[in-house]
Amino acid sequence: MAPELVTPGFLVVLIITFYGGSRAATGATGGVTICSCDLSPGSCDINCCCDPDCSSSDPTNVFSFCLPGSTKAERWSCLPNWLMFRNNAPYSSTVLGAAPAQLLCVSAADASLNYFVTPQKVDAGNFSSVSDPYRGASFSPASARAPAFSSFYQSGDPVLTLSTSNVLGVMRLPGPLGDQRLCTDPNPARFLLDDITSCVRRFSNLSVSCETDRSLSVLYYQDMAVLRVPADVIDLNAIKVPISSSVANVPILQGDVCENVVTQVIYTVLYNGTQGITNVSVDFILSNVSTTSDVISQTFSVLYKPVTLASQGSVQSRSGNPGYLVGLPVLSDIGRLSLLRSLVGDSCSHSDVQFGVNAVSGCVIRGQDQETCADLQARAYQLLLGGRAPGSLAMFGNTTAGQSGDRTSIIYQNCSLQGDCASSCLLPTSLHIQILWASVGLVSNPQSQLLGGRFVFGCEFVQCRGATALQTRVSFTDLTRRGPSPRSSPGVTSRAPLEFFSPFQSSTAEGPAMSLLCLTLVMLLTCL
């Protein structure tokens, strides 16, 4: 049967009716009624394609793009191009895509596109009918779900606290914020993550803030209890763990000095696995601060200990077993090696020397009144060394404090110090800690061992009452000597054996003799 002939015009309408779709396209096909991007009367706004002040008849040829709303959108009806034999529709059309997936798109005239529609007028008569479709929860705030609390703490969870007025909070470990390192209090202490932070607090009038600002008082850290496990928050009768401390002195203003100011806070948290926290204690270091100072530096730390280890007393953590691990502290005969670090102003603190991590840090000190040159020299040495001078380094990371073996002596290069503090003083201003190490043991599991250490001091003449910068530097040198690669076993060829004793038969001239010897041994074993 011959196909039914249909006029092309009818074919377009039929196909558009049953196969047509619509999509939005943007093109410079005419200006919009209201040009919302025309912000500069009398001058052409860049990329505003509907601005009548732009002289070009087609701004799309000048601008790299057109701002939204500045061109008239078009509504297209598209269908596969292969369905069309001829197009005589009275609308503009275009072909999109590449053969054979081309689309013929016809644009219909739609006067409502890109025109502002006059909003519906609302009055007392139609208010209810207009608002009824939107009644419901959209006008009410969403109800907040009660937070779910775990039955036990996991590593990294914030430690929950409860105040005396039953206000839920977290144990806070204030941390630095911004380049001025100002203290931000909401920083939480994370369960099982030992941490130490330092920050500063600024005061416009310390005489007024001395006794009123709770951040300077021990009461700020004692007026709460710790939840044993997070699930205890839903049971007000559950056992709470109080935060205990032996320090009770509060700040008091004495003349121009604010006494008993909290400058260091040390939390010690004991835990018993998934059963939760069993004890929390906090220690403080108090200082006397002049009221003329507008900056006070504070240090906060938290240390977690399992109950089993806490009952055994102080337990030294390993830095490797046996070899050192990168990033863990370097051990000495008096504890951990330390590195100077600066807090705020003239304050100096210390941090651990980490194995395999080269570092440089320092701080600033000043000579005090009535302090002699010898006193200043001794104080500089003590700061650079972090206290006492170590005599030896632990060669392995699992060396215990009382173990005498597996240690290497430290070589010191001191300065020749002399003079008084009348004008200038020869002061140790730098310490370079040089540590030699090497990998020992199996190639598949090498262990890092310390071979030696040297402390080199640098000295210079400084003004006794001026500011002096102290610097510590640590460097690690790898002296590992790689041995020859292990000998491989005799290779076995992929060929099939030519006789019974292959591949034990030697390829040398002694081959026949070796074969005969092996055959004799087999015969003797058979007879036995």
Image (spheres, grey):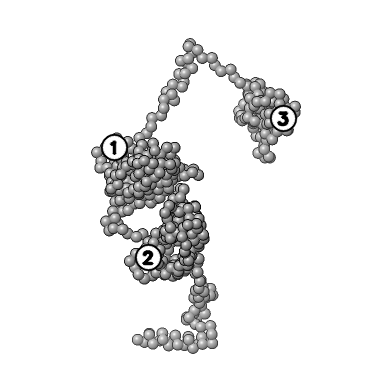
Looking at the picture, which amino acid does disc 3 mark?
Answer: Pro
Q: What element carries label 3?
A: helix
Most distant residue in the top direction: 125
Quickly name the residue at label 1: 164
From the viewer's perspective, is residue 455 above or below residue 52?
Answer: below
From the viewer's perspective, is residue 164 above or below residue 462?
Answer: above
Looking at the picture, which amino acid does disc 1 mark?
Answer: Thr
Which residue does the image show at 47% across and 57% down from the upper left?
422
Q: Is residue 501 left or right of residue 115?
A: left
How many angstroms separate mark 3 from mark 2 (CA)?
80 Å
Tell me which label, 3 or 2, sits earlier in the chain.
Answer: 3
Quickly name the residue at label 3: 59
- Image x and y of residue 326, in percent: 45, 60
Disc number lying in front (1 or 3): 1
Q: What element carries label 2?
A: loop
> As rendered, which of 209 and 74 lies closer to the eye?
209
